[in-house]
Image (spheres, rainbow, N blue to C red):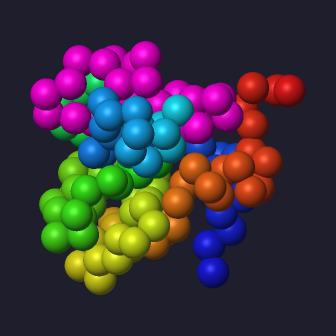
Amino acid sequence: MTDLRAVLEAAGTVAVVGASTDESKPSNRIPATLLAAGFDVIPVHPRADEIVGRKAYPSLADIPVPVDIVDVFRPADEAPDIARQAVAIGAKVLWLQAGLVSPEARQIALDAGLTYIEDNCIGATTTRLGISKTGS
């Protein structure tokens, strides 16, 4: 079993694929939760310029800094392609949100040496474990 605390404590940058501009959606609230916990959140959205006050990028490949965790808020059938993109940018972790499971994405991630987490909310896990990068 993956040590979620260790994964989150080791990470600094989280790219959120499928981040939403709609504040009522979990794909907007979770990035805000991660920001509040002190993570460097990078929204990935094909058309948005900014989400949760952070510059958004159209794809993982467009992000100009190293990414620790790729957090996925897209349908499970898109997860294998996102997994390939995560591998291509050198991410360390592929994290599929609650409700998302993809055996193919799992295999792609594990074959490339990424930590793989599925069907688990990164925001709820961060809150439950009391993870904070803010030093407070």
Residue 17 image-quadrant placement: top left
Magenta residue span: 33-55
Residue 64 visible? The answer is: no
Q: Residue at x 68, y 68 (%)?
A: 3
* Residue 60 point in image, percent of width and height: 25, 39
The x, y position of residue 102, in whole percent, is 29, 77
13 lies left or right of 132: left
Nearer the observer, 14 or 67: 14
Q: Nearer the viewer, residue 24 or 16?
A: 24
| Picture residue at 71% right of the left edge, 49% below the top | 127
Across and down, in percent, residue 125 comes to 65, 58
Camera-nearest residue between 108 and 136:
136
Q: Image quadrant of residue 108?
A: bottom left
Figure check: 100 above or below 31: below
Residue 114 location, quadrant: bottom left
User: Residue 75's spot in the image, x, y percent?
Assistant: 22, 64
Is the C terminus in the top left, top right, bottom left or bottom right quadrant? top right
